[in-house]
């Protein structure tokens, strides 16, 4: 396995973990610092995400985990005054290189947001196909296939197959969020980022999303930000704890939740703060 | 009840009932309510009185000409023959021309101001655009006569006739004052309204929609086209309708540049006339009862056209807004 999951690693020295990896992580950051104007949201995070795993980012509100996530596919720079130092590498290629197009990057690193964001004027079908049309034109049959596959992967197909032409707004909140997952994975990205995908959902909707997330890691590398520690424990292979914009501890989820090395991590996961 | 605890000791018992009675009995509230009710009732009342007066004023013309008034094109006060077709056509055509020119430009400006412009520029430019709406229309008219008409006569009009002269729209002599000139000046006048409202509507589109599109790898333009414009469409239609309403009723600037000739011509270079312009020009000089009555009939017609256009627009917005969307509330 990859070193991030071995408990023998000293923490928090994740840079070392990267050097011992048998295969390089699909996505990694190198001393990533994220700024809003002059204020720092994330400082000096070096972290790797191996392929086909679910990686959870946990921490109290305002700890910078969402900002960190948004740096990974360059959505942070869409915010007012958002800029970064350091590097983000997708397959060892710097995504902030001047020659890299943010649009092309975001087709390889998809993102699901906190609240479901279906396009309200589009049908279920058109929502899933929206990302495809942003890229290259496909033949009708191909689009049908991709839409069905994405909806099946998002465990939504059976619920919507009879109303693909209906409005996406007629779906429940949980269905809308799975629709957004389908829309994100339809263009076949390599990495899927999920920013607190269940925080606006009821327990049932949450459970479905968690099941989908675990299923998806067969095809994608997944990074999920969550407020909910049980969710991190249930879905992820590795977990990173953020606090006050810095990375406090990272390791195998089991280790983080059963034997955290850092006192703050322990205090947070046992519910003493946050 | 929480309120019993917080009210002064003397009123503690039976507070709920007492406080309701207090509210109902409060004199200030009663007066305030009465004033607001009167103000609100005054609007439909005014509309009704206006309509009644117009019908009463045009009775003579209605009984003499009937509905033929709308299709007849002869307007001869001396022979006491009146037909408003050229006026009606002129009003609709000049407004349509104005929208054809103003809508693409205005949407472009609004999209630029909300999505593409550097942050420092957005607010000042929006402010300047709103200032344009404050210029009196007679000033636009004068500017039209002294600046726009000479300019168009020597540049754009000959160019159009050269390039598109095979179309009947761009044939015939170029005088300067014309249907096209009126359309252009109207376009300039309604643009501030359309831009301001569309800008508000576009600003009301949630950032999450924009991010959702960009997160899928859409370019800025694709995000505008697939996420932002569809979300805002009912509000944008509302913005256009507001502009159309302005254009239909605009009087002063139009009468100064349209040429005021009572004629329907295929050529946009030919002078025309509008309902509003005819009323403004002739009302003070009309001496015969039938002439005055015919002008009131024109006013009634303008009133009906405006109401119909607005009702149709409202219907359009309803149908488009079905399935949610932003900005419909802005209307």
Image (tube, coloured by chain):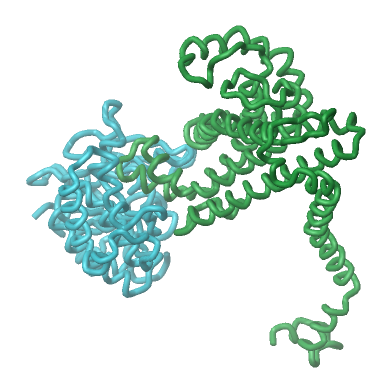
Q: x%, y% of residue A75?
A: 36, 42
What residue appears at the point 26 percent right and 64 percent down from the top-left corner?
A: A260
Relative vertical location of residue A202 with respect to residue B288 in this rendering, above or below: below
In-front residue for pair A272/B157: B157
The hue of chain B in the figure is green
Residue B70, x across and y down, in percent = 68, 41
Q: Residue furthest top?
A: B154
Toward the viewer: A274 or A88? Answer: A88
User: Which residue is nearer to you in this view: A103 or B155?
Assistant: B155
Furthest residue to the bottom? B13
| x, y percent for residue A153 | 19, 60
- Is residue B247 in view? no
Horizontal relation, residue A254 to residue B316: left or right: left
Picture quarter with the N terminus of chain B: bottom right
Classify residue B297 as left or right of residue B162. Answer: right
Name above or below for residue B269 compared with residue A158: above
Quadrant hosting residue B323 = bottom left
Could you tell whether A112 is left or right of A26 in the image?
right
Quarter residue A258 falls in: bottom left
Residue B189 visible (yes or no): yes
Judging from the image, what is the letter of the chain drawn in cyan?
Answer: A
Q: Position of residue B231 (x, y in %)?
A: 46, 49
Position of B175 relative to A172 (above/below)? above
């Amino acid at each position: 396995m990859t070193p991030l999951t071995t408990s023998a690693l000293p923490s928090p020295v994740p840079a070392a973990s990267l050097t011992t990896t048998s295969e390089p992580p699909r996505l990694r950051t190198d001393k990533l610092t994220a700024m809003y104007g002059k204020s720092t949201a994330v400082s000096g995070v070096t972290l790797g995400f191996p392929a086909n795993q679910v990686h959870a980012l946990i921490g109290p509100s305002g700890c910078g985990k969402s900002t960190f996530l948004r740096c990974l596919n360059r959505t942070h720079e869409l915010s007012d005054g958002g800029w970064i130092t350091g590097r983000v590498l997708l397959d060892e290629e710097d995504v902030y290189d001047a020659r890299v197009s943010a649009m092309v990057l975001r087709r390889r690193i998809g993102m699901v947001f906190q609240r479901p964001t279906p396009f309200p004027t589009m049908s279920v079908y058109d929502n899933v196909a929206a990302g495809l049309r942003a890229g290259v034109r496909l033949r009708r049959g191909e689009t049908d296939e991709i839409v069905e596959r994405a909806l099946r992967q998002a465990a939504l197909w059976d619920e919507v197959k009879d109303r693909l032409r209906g409005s996406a707004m007629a779906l429940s909140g949980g269905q809308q969020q799975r629709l957004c997952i389908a829309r994100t994975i339809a263009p076949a990205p390599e990495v899927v980022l999920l920013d607190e995908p269940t925080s606006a959902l009821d327990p049932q909707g949450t459970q479905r999303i968690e099941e989908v997330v675990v299923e998806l890691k067969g095809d994608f590398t997944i990074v999920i930000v969550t407020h909910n520690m049980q969710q991190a424990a249930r879905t992820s292979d590795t977990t990173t704890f953020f606090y006050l914009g810095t990375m406090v501890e990272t390791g195998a989820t089991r280790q983080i939740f059963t034997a955290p090395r850092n006192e703050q991590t322990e205090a947070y996961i046992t519910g003493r703060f946050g | 009840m929480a309120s019993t605890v917080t009210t002064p000791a003397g009123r503690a018992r039976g507070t709920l009932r007492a406080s309701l009675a207090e509210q109902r009995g409060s004199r200030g509230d009663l007066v305030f309510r009465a004033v607001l009710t009167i103000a609100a009732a005054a609007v439909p009342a005014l509309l009704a009185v206006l309509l009644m007066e117009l019908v009463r004023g045009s009775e003579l013309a209605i009984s003499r000409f009937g509905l033929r008034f709308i299709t007849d094109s002869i307007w001869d006060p001396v022979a006491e023959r009146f037909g408003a077709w050229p006026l009606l056509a002129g009003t609709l055509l000049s407004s349509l021309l104005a929208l054809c020119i103003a809508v693409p430009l205005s949407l472009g400006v609004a999209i630029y101001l909300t999505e593409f412009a550097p942050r420092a520029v957005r607010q000042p430019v929006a402010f300047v655009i709103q200032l344009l709406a404050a210029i009196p229309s007679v000033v636009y008219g004068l500017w039209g006569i002294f600046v726009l008409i000479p300019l168009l006569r020597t540049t754009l009009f000959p160019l159009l006739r050269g390039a598109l002269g095979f179309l009947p729209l761009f044939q015939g002599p170029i005088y300067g004052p014309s249907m096209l000139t009126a359309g252009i000046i109207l376009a300039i006048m309604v643009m501030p309204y359309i831009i301001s409202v569309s800008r508000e509507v576009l600003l009301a589109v949630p950032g999450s929609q924009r991010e959702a599109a960009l997160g899928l790898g859409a370019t800025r333009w694709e995000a505008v086209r697939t996420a932002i414009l569809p979300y805002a469409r009912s509000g944008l239609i509302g913005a256009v309708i507001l502009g159309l309403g302005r254009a239909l009723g605009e009087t002063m600037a139009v009468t100064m540049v349209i040429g005021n000739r009572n004629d329907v011509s295929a050529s946009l270079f030919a002078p025309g006339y509008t309902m509003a312009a005819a009323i403004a020009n002739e009302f003070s000089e009309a001496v015969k009862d039938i002439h005055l009555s015919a002008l009131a009939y024109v006013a009634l017609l303008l009133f009906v056209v405006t109401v119909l256009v607005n009702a149709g627009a409202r219907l359009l917005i309803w149908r488009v807004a079905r399935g949610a969307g932003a900005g419909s509330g802005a209307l």
